[in-house]
Image (cartoon, rainbow, N blue to C red):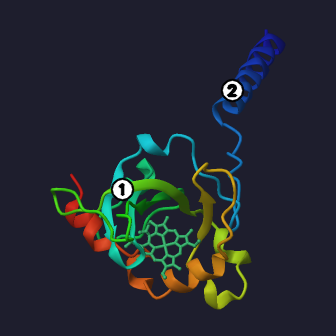
Amino acid sequence: MKHVTWGAVAAMVLAMVFVGCAQVPPSPQVQKYSDSELPVPADYKSWPKFLSDVQRADVKQVREIYINPTGHSTKMGDEFPNGTISVMEIYKVREAADGTPLKGADGKFVKGELSKIGVMGKGAGWGESVTPPELRNGDWVYSMYMADATTKAPDNTATCRACHLPLTDKDYIFRYDEYFQKRVK
Ligand code: HEC
């Protein structure tokens, strides 16, 4: 009788171990990206808009900025969480024959062709390999692509870092306040 009970206990223990193993998924292998490696996510156009129709008269551009759902869940005042990705489309402004930028009836620039696509993303430890360390923007990394979204643009990512760097209290995001103010809650 006794050895039967032990057999049953052993079977139960084995069953528990087995179920326990099945319930613990292997820790997800999160890929680490450095500058110029982070790709343009294929589905970014289905993401929430960060800001639309950003008018850049100084460089004759219109910009469309998207943020992934992870970033979009952020509350004003907080940093964007790891896993946030922002994609910025850079469009040329259409020009008259004499080079004057064209404006529509709404007073906004007329969007021309897409020229480049910029990406910013953050993940745990992504910024650690950045040299020189003074150019670290927390754990953000930067990539810039041509309009086909795969050909790397010639931009040096040190320039991205240097320009975004001063925005330490806005998590390195220029239009941080504008985004949270305009965002449809
Ligand atoms: C001279 C300054 C400057 C440089 C250099 C620069 N940026 Fe930005 N970036 C901005 C500004 C300003 C914005 C906000 C949108 C706007 O006003 O055009 C912005 C916005 C962005 C955004 C949208 C998210 C956000 O931060 O608002 C991405 C993505 C981005 N930049 C990527 C890049 C990448 C990649 C590079 C380098 C290849 C780069 N930037 C270089 C000034 C800069």
Q: In the image, what residue occupies the spot 51% across and 84% down?
A: 163
Residue 97, above or below 173: above
Residue 151, above or below 166: above
Q: Is residue 11 visible?
A: yes
**Residue farthest along the front direction in this orientation:** 97
Q: Is residue 126 left or right of residue 52?
A: right
Q: Is residue 127 left or right of residue 88?
A: right
Could you tell me which secondary element the residue under label 2 belongs to? helix
Measuring from the top left, give residue 180's x and y in whole percent: 26, 65
Measuring from the top left, give residue 102's x and y in whole percent: 29, 63
Q: Nearer the viewer, residue 24 or 167?
A: 167
Residue at image mark 1: 111
Q: In the image, what residue occupies the spot 31% across and 59% down?
A: 53
Q: Quadrant of the N terminus?
A: top right
Measuring from the top left, give residue 155's x and y in whole percent: 65, 73
The answer to which image quadrant residue 2 occupies is top right
Residue 18, above or below 43: above
Q: Nearer the viewer, residue 77 or 41?
A: 41
N-terminal-most mark, 2 or 1: 2
Residue at image mark 2: 16
Q: Is residue 140 left or right of residue 106?
A: right
Q: In the image, what residue occupies the spot 67% across and 77% down?
A: 156
The answer to which image quadrant residue 21 occupies is top right
Could you tell me which secondary element the residue under label 1 belongs to? strand
Q: Is residue 66 visible?
A: no
Q: In the image, what residue occupies the spot 60% across and 82% down?
A: 159
Q: Are marks 2 and 1 in contact (CB under 8 Å)?
A: no
Q: Amino acid at mark 1?
A: Lys
Q: Amino acid at mark 2?
A: Met
Q: Nearer the viewer, residue 152 or 5?
A: 152
**Residue farthest along the bottom direction in this orientation:** 134
Q: How many marks?
A: 2
